[in-house]
Amino acid sequence: MDLGLLGRRALVCASSRGLGLACASALAREGCDVILNGRDAGRLADAADEIERLHGRRPTLAMADLNTASGRATLLEIAAGPDILVNNNAGPPPGKLGDWDHAAWLGALEANMLAPIELITAVVGGMRERRFGRIVNITSAVVKSPRLGLSLSTTARTGLTAFCKGLQREVVADNVTINNLLPQHIDTGRQQEMAQRMMRDRGISFEEARALQARMVRAGRLGRPEELADACAFLCSAQASFISGQNLQVDGGSYDGLI
């Protein structure tokens, strides 16, 4: 299927590895001019090399820290009016209620709610004027299935979801859509970190922890980053213009709720 994305300018945040890199690669495959973002110059260059090798398109590099106002300003200057914005950022670590002081809450809100809101606010006007825009936020399954130990992530990402639900009602008539991808059990570095945490907490081997992770998924396996990335590419497509304000769970059928 031709997704109608040839020549579209796509800014993918936190895209030097993991889900962000997978989404950037999928969009480059579909003909987008991709802007890669990260904080490590070497890792960014390696990611760009990988995308160029796979798809013959060299991304633009934007080394900037999403969690700072100056970093976001740098990113927006380099992106220069993108047609597509994929918001992504590392989530805060899990913990217990007593672990989170005021600074921890502010850090989570800055990284996973305020930063994407500021980027959306900066680019959505140009998208409306050009009569094309696709905004995809990579959030988390905990937005629909909150867990106390992941409250920092849940609270911040739910706030972003609420903001975007209201905004999309105003912008969808200008062919600007806003949707959210809710990953769970995708095989990235985050899952390996969670496996190591299980090793410490339960006194089991890494292999045993990984097997437990797979058994938690209805599909019986961890998801691949490329599977989420293909969903992202479709939500950015010309064909997806009538899909907005939605939360698409990419979790191997693990969500137990009806809606």
Image: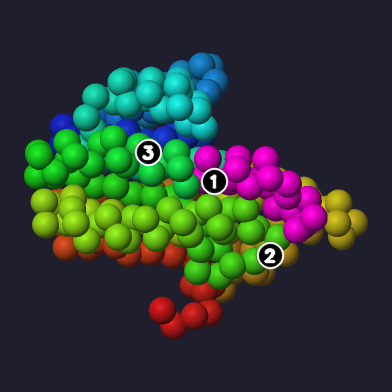
Task: Give the residue type at disc 1.
Answer: Leu
Judged from the image, the secondary structure of the residue bearing numbered disc 3 is helix
Instruction: Quadrant for the C terminus, please.
Output: bottom left
Q: Residue at x 19, y 57 (%)?
A: 170
Task: Give the residue type at disc 3.
Answer: Glu
Q: CA distance from mark 2 to mark 3?
A: 27 Å
Q: Which residues are magenta?
A: 91-112
Q: Which mark is on residue 109? A: 1
Q: Residue at x 75, y 58 (%)?
A: 97
Q: CA distance from mark 1 to mark 3?
A: 12 Å
| In front of the other: 65 or 99 | 99
User: Mark 1 vs mark 3: which is more N-terminal?
Assistant: 1
Residue receiving disc 3: 118
Q: Are marks 2 and 3 in contact (CB under 8 Å)?
A: no
Secondary structure character of the magenta stretch overall = helix
Tag in front: 1 or 2: 1
Judged from the image, the secondary structure of the residue bearing numbered disc 1 is helix
User: Mark 1 vs mark 2: which is more N-terminal?
Assistant: 1
199 relative to 34, above or below: below
